[in-house]
Image (tube, rainbow, N blue to C red):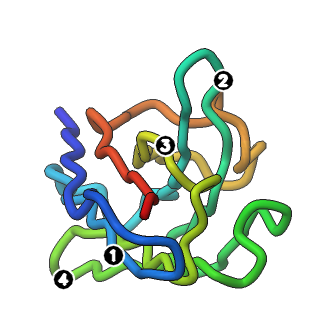
Amino acid sequence: QVQLVESGGGLVQPGGSLRLSCAVSGRTFSRSTMGWFRQVPGKERTFVAAINSLGAITYDTNSVKGRFTISRDNTKNTVYLQMSSLEPEDTAVYYCAATPKIGGRIASTLNYEYWGQGTQVTVSS
């Protein structure tokens, strides 16, 4: 069974940085596509970034605007989301997700089979 556990969220001032981590159990991590999504109350969960097993990366450029960086460490079964120049609009619960699928609609929540419990990120002065 695959389990995902996010960490690294918290309260940060506008313009600050945070690094989220997602630790994944299971031996299939290196072959999985990993994604980060975020959700604010009352709205749907939206795509932030994804990285596949070959290291190919996709960002939602509208929201990320070059401020976020996704990476993975297959030796640690962990995927990261480095966030900088944070804005109040980035406030959300951030979720990581995993799928063994190759290709598909990488920005769709329907593409992912496994989800973490989420970590709260609050950007406020």
Residue shown at the point (55%, 46%) measured from the top left = 37
Distance in Å between CA atoms under marks 3 and 4: 29 Å
Residue 35, placed above or below residue 93: below
Residue 40, placed above or below residue 14: above
Residue type at mark 1? Arg
Which residue is the site of mark 3? 92
Tell me where residue 81 appears, x and y as whole percent.
Answer: 43, 71
Label whose residue precedes the other's in the sequence (3 or 2): 2
**Contact between labelled residues 2 and 3, with CB atoms less than 8 Å apart:** no
| Quadrant occupied by the N terminus | top left
Distance in Å between CA atoms under marks 3 and 2: 11 Å
Residue type at mark 2? Glu
Distance in Å between CA atoms under marks 2 and 1: 23 Å
Label whose residue precedes the other's in the sequence (2 or 1): 1
Residue shown at the point (41%, 81%) measured from the top left = 17
Residue 11, placed above or below residue 74: above
Name the image quarter holding residue 67: bottom right
Q: Nearer the viewer, mark 2 or mark 4?
A: 2
Dot 3 surroundings within 10 Å: few (below 14), some, or many (20 or more)?
many
Task: Report the side of 48 relative to 104 (left or right).
Answer: left
For residue 44, the mark is 2
- Secondary element at image label 1: strand
Residue shown at the point (47%, 47%) measured from the top left = 100
Q: Nearer the viewer, mark 3 or mark 2?
A: 3
For residue 19, the mark is 1
- Secondary element at image label 4: loop
